[in-house]
Image (cartoon, helix red, strand yellow):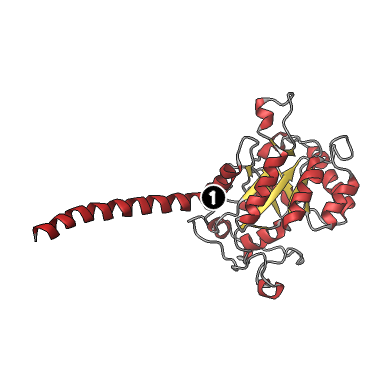
Amino acid sequence: MTRNRSWYLVLVPVLLLAGYFLFAFSGQIEARAPVASAKKPLPATQQNATTPPAAASAVADPNAPFKEVKATAASILARPQVPILCYHQIRNWTSKDGKVGKDYIVKTAEFRAQMKMLADSGYHTILPDQLYAYLTEGKPLPSKPIMLTFDDTKLDQYTVAKPELDKYGFKGVFFLMTVSIGRPNYMTKAQIKELSDQGHVIGSHTYDHHNVKKYEGKDWITQIEKPTKQLEAITGKPIRYFAYPFGLWEPEAIPELQKRGFAAAFQLATKRDQQDPLFTIRRIIASGYWSTRTLHNSIKNSF
């Protein structure tokens, strides 16, 4: 009896210690693996990249004709937000790049690693019409939806980003300033049209990045109406989506955008407007200082 009791006293601590290490090790594995957010799931079909087209028919079709829908602000705000990333420049840093500027410049190798991470983690890119249908009607989205947006017409978005998007079957949204079209290190009309023809979406980003909060009188024509018509002429398609320069907006700007035919507008990371959430859709800047792991964590924690 004494011998059995001695073995018992030795065995129990060993088992407890083994259980602790097993739990700790499994926790490390879980922390390193890409996991879905614990937030309320999006209404989505659970297909993956190999799902046959017929099985994905319930998902909002990015090529379906646009349908304007009146939805209440409360119903839009109640739906879980979709992660949206905002990129600016994709190139290697130079000695001329300042500390602040580097925040907007994602190194080429890092961008490639980020796109691979998104693909390996099971993310599916969506386009603004799909997001609009989801927010206004509750149309299902693909599993793990994400939107990739690119601001300011930079040439490297075409020469570097586009090939990486193509590699994984991703589609992007390009918010363009028209003042820079055709200038050195910026996209040409032909490149913009090619992006549009290949299923990417072109959006308006003003004439010359003028702050919307400072518009007066004819600024709405110069900064919004004329640039939008120019982009429509280049693409042969209606331009329905707008991105605020610097991510800055004010409530007075929303009706001005609405009466010029925009369906939605994108800001950056500040809180959405409680009356017009469609015109204050949130994005986060993919910082040039972030590692791929940091980006992955930000996607999960910011929306």
Give the vertical position of 194 relative to 56 (above or below): above
- 137 or 217: which is nearer to us? 137
- In the rendered structure, the answer to whether residue 145 lies left or right of residue 187 reads left
- 21 or 218: which is nearer to us? 21
Whole-percent x, y for residue 247 in the image: 66, 40
Whole-percent x, y for residue 274 in the image: 56, 50
- In the rendered structure, the answer to whether residue 8 lies left or right of residue 224 reads left
Dot 1: element:
helix
Q: In the rendered image, is residue 26 in sight?
A: yes
User: Which residue appears farthest toward the left when viewing the image?
Assistant: 1
Whole-percent x, y for residue 193 in the image: 87, 52
- In the rendered structure, the answer to whether residue 263 lies left or right of residue 40 reads right
Give the vertical position of 224 relative to 72 (above or below): above
Within the image, what quadrant is residue 129 found in? Answer: bottom right
Whole-percent x, y for residue 166 in the image: 77, 55
- 241 or 37: which is nearer to us? 37
Q: Which residue position is annotated with label 1?
A: 300
- In the rendered structure, the answer to whether residue 61 lies left or right of residue 9 reads right
Within the image, what quadrant is residue 252 found in? Answer: top right
Write the residue at 61% across / 47% down: 282
Give the residue type that dot 1 points to.
Lys
Write the residue at 56% across / 62% down: 42
Write the residue at 45% across / 49% down: 28
